Image: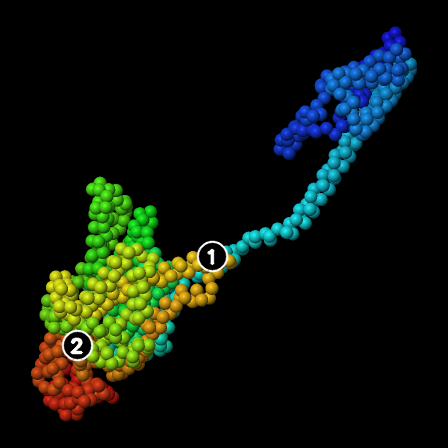
Amino acid sequence: MASARWGGVRTISPEEKAAAPPPADSIASMERPVDVVPPRKQNGRTPSGASVEAAPSSTVDPAATPAADAATAGTTSNGTASAGAAPADAATAAEAQAAGGKPAEATADADAKTTGAKADAAAAETTADADAKAADGAETGAKPVDEAKAGADLKAGGKATAEEKTADDKAAEADSVSLTKKKADRGEEWRKFAPPPERVPGRYAKLGARVWAFVAHEWTLAVLGSFLAAAVMTWPTLKNPTKTLPMDLGDPTLQAWQMAWSGHELPRNPLNVWNSNTFYPESNSFAFSDTLMGYFPVGMIGSGFTAAILRYNIMFVFAFALAFLGVYALVRQLGGTKSGAALAAAAFGFAPWRWTQAGHLHVLSSGGIALSLAMLARGHGYSFRHGYRPEKANWKWVVAGWAVATWQISLGFGIGLPFAYALALLGVIVVGHWALVPRIRSSWWADRKPFARVLLIANLGGGLLFALIGGLMARPYLQVVEDHPNARRVVEEVSVYSPPKWGWLVAPVQSRLWGEEHAGVRALLSVPGEMSIFLGYTALGLAAAGLIFSVWSWRIRAMLAAGTFVSGILAMGTAAPKGGDWSYLILYDILPGWDGIRTPGRLVLWTTLCVAVLAAGAVSAFAERVKEFAEDRVPYRPGLILRTAMVLPMVLALAEGAAIIPQPEMPKAPLAMKDLEAPFFILPSDQINDENYMLWGTDGLKPMVNGGSGFTPIGQQHMRDVCTSFPNPECVEVLREAKVKTLVIIRSRAIGGPYELAASPEAMEAAADLGIVSEERGDVVIYKL
């Protein structure tokens, strides 16, 4: 709209006012570098219509803006634009002073003053141009042209303003980017002094870390170390594992057959497992000696003579490894250090007396005793160092402990029966201690540590399983004693195998270190194989030190010392003071099944266990003192001497346990025996030969009269006696009555014995007169009955 003139006074229309630039003080306040708080952005954008709020230090009174507008739109006395500009500026300054209080200070810096002057000049010039254009338009009457031109000017001015604003924004952003780059550059410089960033492992690196964590774990190393130590200490057992047997060709052949039989029969016909293919026609013949039934899963692998020998050699090494590992686990659970546990494991697993039992795998297989005790202790949260801690209890370990105990008793009652009674005694002590001791110490209503119901259920279930398997295995043994009274061990027989008091200091002949040194004393023993019960000087010396210097409490030390003494007295049998009347013979008369044990010296197993734990307490105390000493060093690092000192006890125990183990080669069965008609009877027949025949019989497991065990059945002995003069009619009648189909004589084994004549040509002719067909097959003479 064009402006109108009234009485020489020019009035500015609203359109001109809108198109005119803002007053100088307003421009100055906008361009002044005040602290501006931008409006909060929503979704990355400034909301439409949002205003910019100035910080309190630079706030301008809103009244200043209308005052400035009024001054700009004010009238002039002469009708010219320049005449009206000065008063407007003055008015604006006055109002700004009144509103702000200190206009001079608000525009103190030089940049603000320069900006304000330029704004005033631009405002005046714009007003003059607008007035001139309006006058020209009024004189010519070209009103639409003036409006269009004015609109174009407004658009051009707005475009220029936007371009200036865009340029300013870009400059500000460039400055910000430049400043950021400078800060980033400075950050890079300081980052050089920072530690390198942690690398994120990849999939294969994570897998490798898990594998290494498993391999480097204490229990992985303990298992591997146990088997490595067993393989080295029993060398050369594994040198020719399919041809040779450790120690001798007596009981090892019997036990190789036992694993083969249980592995063959138990999965196929478990109800018939006790009626073995040997000792024909006797029943329950598998119960004539300890059965090693727990090894039947191994017996299922392979078949025949070679597999039986290989199986035995592997389990022979396994027995030593398990004994080592079991005691290591037990001492660690009770609170011993690693070095103390290693010493105890070596003292128990490779005690010198064990080599006297090298031919008795059921005696060597005692590691399950220590392992089950370790699991039961862990399941109940118990240790010697901390006592019973309910929060550490875990019923799963209780179940596992009872399972291992059940497996242990399935290997045989020779050491399984004392273990069962030991568990019963331990249970009575634990229950009595839990129920009575707190009441005695304080009052009748004293609080006891809680015993979880789940632990009670686990113990009842595990104990029931243990008793059930033990009862099922005991039944055929009780039947054997009833059917064969000579199977019962009388006191006179027990006395033959009872070690004297000096037997504690006699090492077996197999001992590499002390075997020859103790030869003179060993000659005084009637049965050196059952009376040499030497524990080793290292174990005995450290156990004595453990009575004084130990990590175990005095109460625990007293209990271990009592266990050592009582088990030692029992191991002497009737050679104990007073002839064993107040020790071994009490158990012999009272406890069921105890009269079936003829070798008291094997109870040295429990003495060794108590001594090993006592010694572990002393070594553990020493190891803790070494750790305290090493912690005071800077940096923390035990020296070579200290490290060596911690493993030296284990090394000494292993050195004393080293042995020279004979490895005789087991001959194969003659080829002529492969297609024998069963049942058959092989001569010569005695304990050693029959055990060899049992191993030969693993090829097919056919019924045979032969068999070796802890006693000789009367029927078998009668056959042996009457056949010494074969082919006499009495022998033929006895064999035919027993339905024996074939009689076999091995000439090489019969030479010089009572059965030598049975293989002679004369005997073959005499047999033909009795209607018996004979056949020579190399070294073997076969009579078909």
Mark 1 vs mark 2: give the one in front: 1
Query: Which mark, by number, is residue 705?
Result: 2
Q: Position of residue 359 (x, y in %)?
A: 26, 74
Q: Marks 1/2: CA distance?
A: 73 Å
Question: What quarter of the picture does the N terminus occupy?
Answer: top right
- 519 or 687, which is in the foreground? 519
Left or right of residue 38, residue 675 in this image: left
Residue type at tag 2: Val
Residue type at tag 1: Asp
135 is higher (above) or lower (below) than 278: above
Residue found 74% across the figure and 39% down from its top? 175
- 476 or 333, which is in the foreground? 333
Q: Position of residue 617 (x, y in %)?
A: 33, 60
Tag 1 secondary structure: loop
Residue found 32% across the figure and 72% down from its top? 657
Residue sticking out furthest to the front: 548
- 578 or 324, which is in the foreground? 578
694 is higher (above) or lower (below) than 80: below
Left or right of residue 17, residue 40 in this image: left
